[in-house]
Structure formats: structure tokens, C-alpha cells
Amino acid sequence: MSEASAVHKDRLFLFVASCISLCVTSMIFIIRGDIEGSLTSEFHLSKEQMGLIWGPAFLGFTIAIFICGAAVDKLGMKLMHILSAIGFIGGVILILLAPQPDIPEGEIVSGIFSTTGTTMLYTGFLLMGLAQGVVEGVINPLIATMYKDRKAHMLNVLHAFWPLGLVIGGILAVIMGAVGASWQVKIGIIIIPSLVYLFMCLQKEYPQTERVTANVSTGDMFKACLHPLFILLWCCMWLTAACELAPDQWFPTIMKDLTGLQGTMFLVYTAGLMFILRFFFGSVVHNFSPFLVLAVCSVLVFIGLFWLGSLSTGVSVFIAFAAATVFGIGKTYFWPTMLGIVSERFPKTGALGINLMGGAGMLSIYFALPIMGSSLDTAGPGEALQSVAYLATVLVVVFGALFFFFQSKGGYKAEKIDKHSETATDY
């Protein structure tokens, strides 16, 4: 086998391991939403308290991904990837061992730390959130390093496995629910793919990050993160994540309440759309300006969420899935395209830049989940969705302005670290 062939094979192996680990993160996401009713009932929680207990999954992600921005350069991506698998397994075990509060039926716990069981739920979701942050903190810079000339495209292909994990997890949850499986069995299944990618991580050596191999100093890395455009994109990441993932986490509950239909299947459906579009049409961000793609997506997200929020019990299945289709298409390119822009426009920020973006996204969800939960408790599912829809209008304006700004400068250009070629591709 030639050296080039061996390198390609190793890259593919690490890419597959990355895809499986990302699938694990989204399987947790959809299964967590599917078992929300059981957890709320058995642990005597309100919707707002459930949102607060889910929150650590996103807070842990944020903490871990910020740490990973520097740690992957020091400790190596291989060790960090291994630790993420261990974190998933440990988090699931904590949740499985959490005892139910011994309080009368119908009463709500006084606080999420007032009982051992709810405290263990919080800790378990926190540990899994830390693991998820480590996964994103490793695989995003890993793909950007292995595929330097196709960053945005390959990041979209990689992140196709987030919705694929939603599809797999959702279908498994529905099947297990149909046969009467407990919520413990549903969450416990996460251990299996975690062990698979743990084994894969142990098989290969990982490359150094692009920034390290290019000898970009830590000072230059932090300096690049202070660029005005980087800061603007970082702020936008808060809104794109809130528009995509906050509704997604509550989708099984919200869609069931709005339509009376199986809510989890709506999330599975939109996830299937996302997988197809990201995996087979990830190059759209290269065929058009990524800012134009993001602006169009923002319009579709606004229409989709507002339409979904207007649904009511008895609505036709066709109308319900049509609204979900618009939302599903709209949210498809948000997360990976934002990461792709940062890795292409600011390669000197390295793993730190990508991870700061991912951290902003998940920190946004940490705050958005209990807010949506409170809105569900007080105003109902329709208003909860429509209140998020308005955030997308801000994104339409910002991404539209950035598209026209870059067009006036000759088009969007992806920059390279090497001093011999400042730009690579025009869009």
C-alpha cells in the first residue's frame, strides 16, 4: 500500500470514528426529549425544572468545548476523544442509578437539588454534556486539519451525522416505546455506540491540529479571535443555535401537544431531511456564498417555526409535515456553515476559534431551554415556538448584510494560513 493510500485510509477511519461519536451526541439529544415525560413524572418535576436539569448538558458542552480549544493542542485529539466516550458511559450510568424522590404523587420537588435522584440526573446530564463538548472540541478541528481545502464542505458532511443520530435514536425510541421498554432501556442504549467509537479511537494515531503544524503562535491565535467579523459571527451563533436546537429539544413534547400526533417522529423527519441535505448537498456552501445560504435558511426557519406555532389539534398530517419541512430545511446548514466560515476565514484561530463558536451555540441553549420550558408552562407550545421564530428575523438582516458586503468586495474568500497564498477559493 502506498503512503498516500495509507494516509487516506487513516483519514477515513478517523472520519468514521468522528461521525459515530457525533451520532452518539444526537442520539442522546432525541432520546432525552423522548423520555422527558417519564422523567418529569417519575422525578416529580415541572417543565421549567426539567429544562434546568437538561441545561447542564449544554453548560457542560460549553465548558468542555472552551477547554478543548487549548487542550487539543496540548493533550492531543486522541486522548480527548477517548475521554469523551468514557464521559458518555459514566453519565448514562449515573442517570440509570438515580433514585426516584419519595414524595406524594402529584407534588413537585422543591428544587432540582432537593433530592438525591434529581441531583444525580443533573450530574449525569452534566457529565454527558462535558463529553459532548469534548467530541465537538475534537472532531471539528480534526476534520478541518485533515481536509484543509474542503473545510466547509466536509464539516457539513460530518455534521450530517448529527441528524442521522437523531433519526437512529428517534426510531429506536419509538420502537422501544411500542414494545413497552422503560426509559432506562432507552437511555442505556447509548452505551453501545460509545463503546464502538472508544475502541476505534484506540486504534489510530491522530494528527496535530492545523494551527500547530503551521507554527501559528498562541498569541496570534488569540489575536485572530478578536477580529470584528469573528466577534459578530460569535454573537450570531447564539441566535442560530437557539433557533435550531432549542425547538428541537422540546420538539417531541411540543408537536404532540400541538397536533396530537407522535411528536418524536416529527424530529426524526426533520433530522432525515437534514442528513440528506448535509451529506449529499453539503457543497451548496461552496456553490453559493455561505452568507447567502445562511440568510435564506434564516428566512425558512422564521416561516417554519411561526407556521408550526400556529398548528392545533386536528390539523391535517400533510399541513403539519409541510410546516416541519420548511423548518427542517431552514435549520439544516446553520451549525456546520457557521463553523465552516470560521475555519475558512480565520484559520489562525485553530481549534480555539471553532470551539468558541460551538461553545457559544451550546451556551445559548443552556439559557434557552428553561425559558422555553417556562413558556410552555405559562403560554403554551404555539407561543413558545413563535417567540423563538422572531430571533431568525435578526439573522436575516445580519447574514443578508454580510452577503452584500462581501459581494461588494469581490466575493467571499476562504483564507489559508500559509504565507504563500492568502486566499484559496472565491464564492
Image (spheres, grey):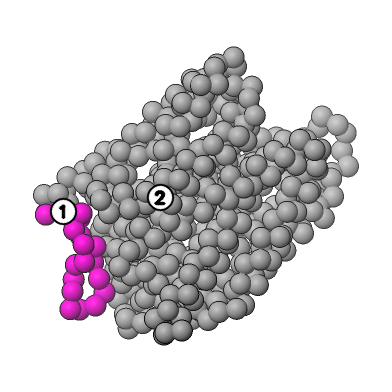
> Spatial distance from mark 2 to mark 1, Cα to Cα?
25 Å
Find residue 81 and name its label.
none
Q: Nearer the viewer, residue 197 or 66?
A: 197
Residue 21 coordinates in the image, percent (x, y): 58, 62
In magenta, the rendered stretch is 409-427
Instruction: Evaluate whether residue 394 shows in this view.
Output: no
Q: Residue at x 37, y 52 (%)?
A: 282
In x, y percent, where is residue 48? 64, 37
Q: Nearer the viewer, mark 2 or mark 1?
A: 2
Q: Which mark is residue 411?
A: 1
* Label 1 residue SS: loop
Do labels 2 and 1 touch, CB within 8 Å? Answer: no
Q: Residue at x 70, y 52 (%)?
A: 122
> For residue 94, which quarter of the picture?
bottom right
In the rendered image of this protein, does residue 161 appear above or below residue 74? above
Q: Quadrant of residue 315?
A: top right
Residue 277 occupies which quadrant of the picture?
A: top left
Residue 280's label in the rendered image is 2
Instruction: From the image, give the main secondary structure of the stretch colored magenta.
Output: loop
Q: Position of residue 45 (x, y in %)?
A: 73, 38
